[in-house]
Image (cartoon, helix red, strand yellow):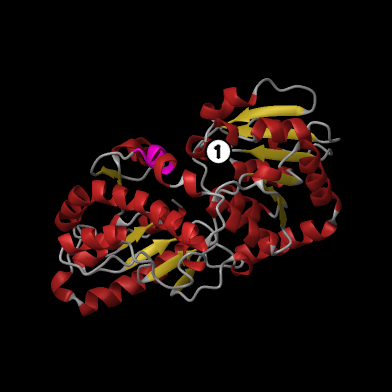
Amino acid sequence: MPLAWALRSHGHEVRVAVPPAHVQTVARSGQLPVPVGHDVDITELFKRDVQPLIGNPDPQVRKRRTLAAIGIFAEVAEAMSGEAVAFARSWSPDMVVYEPTAFTGPLIAGVLGVPAVRHLWGPDGTNAGPARGGRIEVPALRRLAERYGLSDIDSTGDYSVDPCPPSMQAPVELERIPMRYVPYNGAASVPRDLLEPTGRTRVCVTWGVSTAALAGPEAFLAPRVVGALAELDAEIVVAVNAATRELIGEPGGNVRVVESVPLHLLLPTCSALVHQGGGGSMLTAVASGVPQLVIPQLPDQRFSAAQLAGTGAGRRLAGEDAEPDTIRAEMRALLDDPAHREAAARLERENRDRPSPLQVARRLEEISSRAVAGHRSMAVPTDEGGTR
């Protein structure tokens, strides 16, 4: 969203092609959604094809797991592709920006012959891990590409907008466009007292529902984490959304539950963040200079947690090892060792010193201009003279 708004503020037209279930989410951001295709039940596909393979260290099984996970998003691309390509052909965008699992993005870019720009959300675990810096051959994606006259779909695209500080990013050779991570949490009201330091150690706990939806309700570890941290001499603030509020239970003592509070407003008053390893939570803490305890359960979360821990700005505790005593011990180590705060401050500076979304928008303008100059027959001017 920060990059989309930067492009809009520079006079360019932006449309966000999404499955129908995500239309309202995009609309609430102020961007213009384009519903395409039909919704795919990712949760059920994950339970069927990926979950049985998690935890097996055998390299061949891990490869099967990776292909199964990619296959889920290939099915989403299949569901979106017909209407997405039809819209793109009629609207004629000059560039396609897409997130790493939105394979419809590079498909559209290939069909139209325009630049494909992948927008990362954190450490690039797929390219650094299963792909080893190369490409993963996915038959389903090749078949989809061939339907539109292409030989294959290169999910890495031509460029990668990278909001992850280099010291925690995977060392994969890509045409990177570095960008400062600017948190986006939507609109919400915030209790005034949460915006000011209390003079007491404050620890934030936030937990999404995606892991529990994919791996089962026993994977929702937030109540166990909150119970363990409640014994510390600290204020525990549990940041939830409407879907997770009832799963936390009733707060008490030094535990406070707040709903739909933007993390980037809450974290500057906190001494630490505990979460499961989602890219948004992790990079919001990085941008706030806050040390993190990450308790990952899924493969991508484990990779991101390892990358963060390698910088010293956080600690990781595998979900299967997250017992109350261990959780408390890890949090005490995070709070007591000044090296973690110093490393978090370094990461915050590293992020702050990177180009802003507006500067990246200008870089994308240059890329688009070069592409249009090389393919003038494909260029379609917009009413406003901007780029689409």
Q: Position of residue 232 (x, y in %)?
A: 84, 35
231 on left or right of 37: right
Q: At x 45% / y 54%, what residue is drawn? A: 65
**Who is closer to the viewer here, 117 or 354?**
117
Q: Is residue 297 above or below residue 60?
A: above
Asked whether 76 falls inside the magenta stretch, the response is no
Q: Considering the numbered disc 1 on the image, is that residue within a helix, a strand or a loop? A: loop
Q: How many marks?
A: 1
Q: Quadrant of the C terminus?
A: bottom left
Q: Position of residue 322 (x, y in %)?
A: 71, 42
Crowding at mark 1 (Cα within 10 Å: few <14, some 14-19, many 20+): some
Task: Tell me the quarter of the picture where residue 13 sits.
Answer: bottom left
Q: Position of residue 269 (x, y in %)?
A: 73, 43
246 on left or right of 16: right
**Who is closer to the viewer here, 305 or 385?**
305
Residue bounds of the magenta highlight:
41-46
Residue at the outermost bottom position: 374
Does the image show residue 46?
Answer: yes
Q: At x 30% / y 71%, what residue is drawn? A: 368
341 on left or right of 75: right
Q: At x 32% / y 57%, what residue is drawn? A: 103
Q: Is residue 273 above or below residue 179?
A: above
28 on left or right of 88: right
Q: Position of residue 379 (x, y in %)?
A: 18, 69
Q: Is residue 231 above or below residue 125?
A: above
**Who is closer to the viewer here, 327 or 166?**
327
Does the image show residue 15?
Answer: no
Q: Amino acid at mark 1?
A: Gly
Dominant secondary-structure state across the stretch colored magenta: helix
Name the residue beneath numbered marker 1. 208
